[in-house]
Image: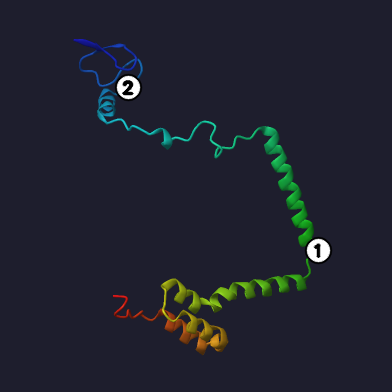
Amino acid sequence: MEYNCPKCGFQISEGALECLNCGIVFEKYKKSQQRPKIQRKPEDHPPKNDPRKIKRSKPEYILISIVVIFALIGIVSVISQITAEDIIVFYMALALFSSIPVFFLPSIVSIIRGHPHQIPILILNIFLGLTMVGWVVALIWSAMPIEKSDEQQ
């Protein structure tokens, strides 16, 4: 007994595992037809004129490339004029600005945790934080378990 291929309509004998015309494997095709189709909502797909999809033409890519090349030329020319003193000043400023959050870490921890003694921890951190002993004490104090009073329970 013969039947037709579900994909191309070619006549196939009963025991065939795949279509000789289009190459479809019948068992895989049956399994794919048995899976439930996923119904997508229209909001799952962005519209065709979605502003998040930026389509650029070739002149725009050329313009962007030119701007990037000029920016790189400018950066190279600035770097060639930098002296050793400028580099030292840059790293000193970088170290200063990156150490500020570390210095105020005990206060930041107490604020994030909602510690009831945030102001005393901040005062201890500001006035005794540079001694390192004061900073460690403030950090330990801010990390200690918060005891809830009878009113809060």
Which numbered disc, 1 or 2, marks the residue closer to the eye?
Answer: 1
Q: Can you identify the residue that label 2 sits on?
A: 24
Q: Which of these two is toward me, 64 or 51? A: 51
Q: Provide residue 81's location: percent of width, then percent of height.
A: 81, 63
Q: Which of these two is toward me, 17 or 81? A: 81
Q: Is residue 139 above or below residue 38?
A: below
For numbered disc 2, what is the local secondary structure? loop
Q: Provide residue 11's location: percent of width, then percent of height.
A: 28, 10
- Of callouts 1 and 2, the N-terminal one: 2
Q: Is residue 112 above or below residue 144?
A: above
Residue 75 located left or right of residue 151: right
Q: Is residue 29 above or below residue 91?
A: above
Q: Provide residue 88's location: percent of width, then percent of height.
A: 72, 74
Q: Which of these two is toward me, 21 or 109? A: 109
Q: Amino acid at mark 2?
A: Ile
Q: Amino acid at mark 1?
A: Gln
Residue 79 located left or right of residue 92: right
Task: Please identify the quarter of the rendering in which residue 1 is found.
Answer: top left
The image quadrant where one finds the C terminus is bottom left
Q: Residue at x 27, y 22 (%)?
A: 26
Total residue callouts: 2
Q: Provide residue 77's location: percent of width, then percent of height.
A: 79, 57
Q: Can you identify the residue that label 1 sits on?
A: 81
Q: Mark 2 packing: few (<14 Cα in 10 Å), some, or many (20+)?
A: some
**Disc on res. 72:** none
Q: Residue at x 69, y 36 (%)?
A: 60
Q: Residue at x 32, y 33 (%)?
A: 38
For numbered disc 1, what is the local secondary structure? loop
Colour convention of the picture: rainbow
Give the Cα distance between marks 1 and 2: 67 Å
